[in-house]
Image (cartoon, rainbow, N blue to C red):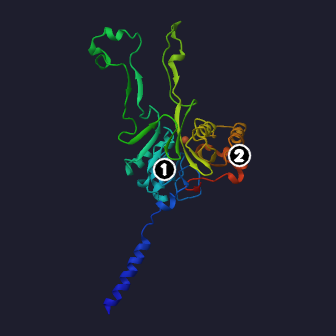
Amino acid sequence: MKKYLFVPILLSFFILSSLNQPEDNTNKIVQEGTITNLYDAFGKDTTLTPDFGFSCITKYKGKTILFDAGSNADIFKRNMLQLGIDLTQVDMVVLSHGHFDHLNGIDYVLQVNPNVKIYFPYDIFWGAPVPFDATGQEADVKDSLPKYMQYFNGGNTKFLIKQSGRFWNANIEFVKGSKEILPGLFLIATSSQYMGYFSCYPGKSFVEGQFEQDADHCKNTNLPELSLAMKTDKGEVLIAGCSHTGIENIVNETMKTTGNNIELLYGGFHLLPFDRPQTLRIVQLLRQDLKIHRVAPAHCTGHLAFKILKDTFQGDYVYAGLGETISY
Ligand SMILES: [Fe+2]
């Protein structure tokens, strides 16, 4: 008798234990043709930790793409576990630029997926090879010195420094120009003249006890930035990280590179510093001149721009707070 009872008890045990198994949420969340906001300071899901920064994930033609990784690796990790995102499934990472609020979660990404392909702007301050001229002033002085005082024992003084950088041992590519990396998948490269790395050394003229500033010696390298464009039947789906280049410039570069209109503009538009007239002007430009169909603003877009974009785009405004998944 006991033998006959044993089978249903065992079956019930297996059924109950399978119900208790944690679900594999990955395939539910990263669906083809969707974007999920993984890191932001606003959202509806109170189980997630809000923080100022940005990250999102999408799946395009079977490839899972992580775009940016937020400000804090601990918060990023916590939200990934809460959302059930399995970062080992990520095929490639696109990092928009070298600011902390888009970058630091990469430490967690590389811990769980150390060989993942990373695309990064060509930014020498984060590891891109540095073209360098070490000849210095009065070029003929070099040859007057003994070889052991000359750089590289008298070798070439114009060279490329292949530094290890922030992403030592990572599978990283520093991207200089816009390009198609897979059919229909484009990296859009722009640079901000407002930000970057300014260096200024004493000029050549020494006037009244002071070096005069000389334009040749004062340079802004501009901040390089990457955005991601995905071709769809309805137009490009464009993800921008922080738009330091100017969101309108990123849109223009995307239209020029892809030859396509913008169906959906997603991410940080960086309108936070702008007042109402400036914001109205840019929003009108996006809607009327650049003919953006839908907008899904996040991150550094700002409260005022959220409001103006919502009023302008109305039904074509897509809410995309932390944890939200939208379709394209
Ligand atoms: Fe940002």
Residue 269's spot in the image, x, y percent? 61, 42
Q: Nearer the viewer, mark 1 or mark 2?
A: 1
For mark 1, does the 10 Å Cα neighbourhood hold few (<14), some (14 to 19), or many (20 or more) residues?
A: many
Residue 28's spot in the image, x, y percent? 50, 62
Circle 1 SS class: strand
Q: Residue at x 36, y 39 (%)?
A: 168
**Given the image, on which type of amino acid does mark 1 rest?**
Ile
| Quadrant in which the N terminus appears | bottom left
Q: Is residue 326 left or right of residue 293?
A: left
Residue 254 sits in which quadrant?
top right
For mark 2, does the 10 Å Cα neighbourhood hold few (<14), some (14 to 19), or many (20 or more) residues?
A: some
Residue 220's spot in the image, x, y percent? 53, 25
In the foreground, 126 or 326: 326
C-beta proximity under 8 Å, tags 1 and 2: no
Residue 325's spot in the image, x, y percent? 57, 56
Q: Residue at x 41, y 41 (%)?
A: 172
Q: In the image, which disc is placed on residue 326?
A: none
Q: Is residue 26 left or right of residue 3?
A: right
Q: In the image, which disc is placed on residue 65?
A: 1
In the foreground, 126 or 78: 126
> Farthest residue in the bottom direction?
1
- Mark 2 — residue? 308
Q: Is mark 1 within 8 Å of ligand 1?
A: no
| Quadrant in which the C terminus appears | bottom right
In the foreground, 172 or 269: 172
Q: Residue at x 37, y 84 (%)?
A: 9
Q: Is residue 23 above or below residue 159?
A: below
Measure how far apart labels 1 and 2 are at the Cα level.
Answer: 30 Å
